[in-house]
Amino acid sequence: MQVIYIVLALLSVTAEAYACDYKESPPDAGRITGTSGIAEAWYGDATQRYGHGVLGDSIEAQTLYVKPTGDEGCALSFTTSNQSVFEDVTPRLADVTGDGIDDIITIESDIERGASLAIYSIVENQLQKIASTPAIGTRYRWLAPIGTADFNNDNIADVAYVETPHLGGVIKVWSFAGGAPELLASQSGYSNHRIGENYITGGVTHCNGQTQMIVPSLNWRQTYAITVTDDKIASTVVADNTTSDTIARLLRCQPAG
Ligand SMILES: [Ca+2]
Ligand SMILES: [Ca+2]
């Protein structure tokens, strides 16, 4: 009996592998897994039509794949227009609409107007873009997400990123609770990414009941803890360096050392 189950399981895996037409992912693409409505999400369908290379190579993705929780079939997919790419490595999951179901947070770059933060959701079993921040406005301008947290205390996760982390370094905090993106707060002078790295530095912590962002200064000499109260951003220097060890400790709510 057990053998039959194993054979059936193998057959179903094999059938799915043949049935699902997943286009090749960029070499450094990662997968995110979740439990609140979305089991797995990743980028595929590599393209070189946007030669920015801010993440180390010019191979980006044009399709987002999403597997709903409990769905054994092929992933849902959304392919961008030929005017944009996902200039990103691994999508992020958080419920930014407040319906209890995770949404997918992506960086989508228009080849003429640069990056925007785009939110995708499963709507009636289709993957749809439900909101996006305005594109920065110029090609080869990027943004790097810091993380998600409820910064305005409405019990719905908001999203923070650094816009142009190599130029102006503007933190922007957005709520998508009302559908259209609402800018809660912004402040310049920070960075969380260096050109050529395919990862983002810093993030969001919850230490002693306080939600903070941990990010380097724009010149990478100091590390800041950033809080948002009402629509104001407040920053405190928490380390006079930006080493990976310092930032890892701060993200674990430990002193910088
Ligand atoms: Ca949601
Ligand atoms: Ca919120």
Image (cartoon, rainbow, N blue to C red):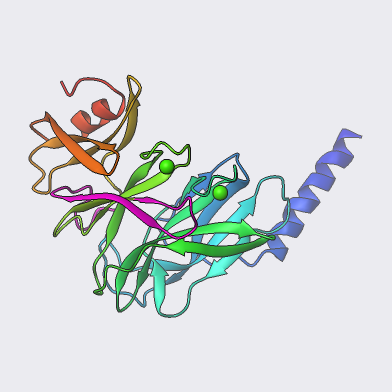
Magenta segment, prevailing SS (helix, strand or loop): loop
Q: Position of residue 26 (x, y in %)?
A: 43, 62
Q: Is residue 68 left or right of residue 177?
A: right
Q: Nearer the viewer, residue 157 or 161?
A: 157
Q: Nearer the viewer, residue 36 or 257?
A: 36
Instruction: Residue at 13% x, 43% y: name it.
Output: 217
Q: Quadrant of ligand 2?
A: top left
Q: Position of residue 197 (x, y in %)?
A: 25, 53
Instruction: Residue at 49% x, 46% y: name it.
Output: 93
* In the image, residue 152 above or below residue 195: above
Using the rendered view, name the quadrant where residue 29 is placed: bottom left
Residue stretch rendered in magenta on the structure: 174-198
Instruction: Residue at 71% x, 63% y: name it.
Output: 18
Look at the image and say whether residue 193 sits in the magenta stretch.
yes
Q: Is residue 204 left or right of residue 100?
A: left
- Looking at this rendering, what residue extends furthest in the front direction? 230
Look at the image and say whether residue 152 sits in the magenta stretch.
no
Q: Is residue 256 left or right of residue 53?
A: left
Q: Is residue 213 visible?
A: yes
Q: Is residue 243 visible?
A: no
Using the rendered view, name the quadrant where residue 221 is placed: top left
Q: Which quarter of the image is occupied by the N terminus?
A: top right
Q: Position of residue 256 (x, y in %)?
A: 17, 24
Q: Which quarter of the image is occupied by the C terminus?
A: top left
- Looking at this rendering, what residue extends furthest in the right direction? 1
Using the rendered view, name the quadrant where residue 163 is placed: bottom left
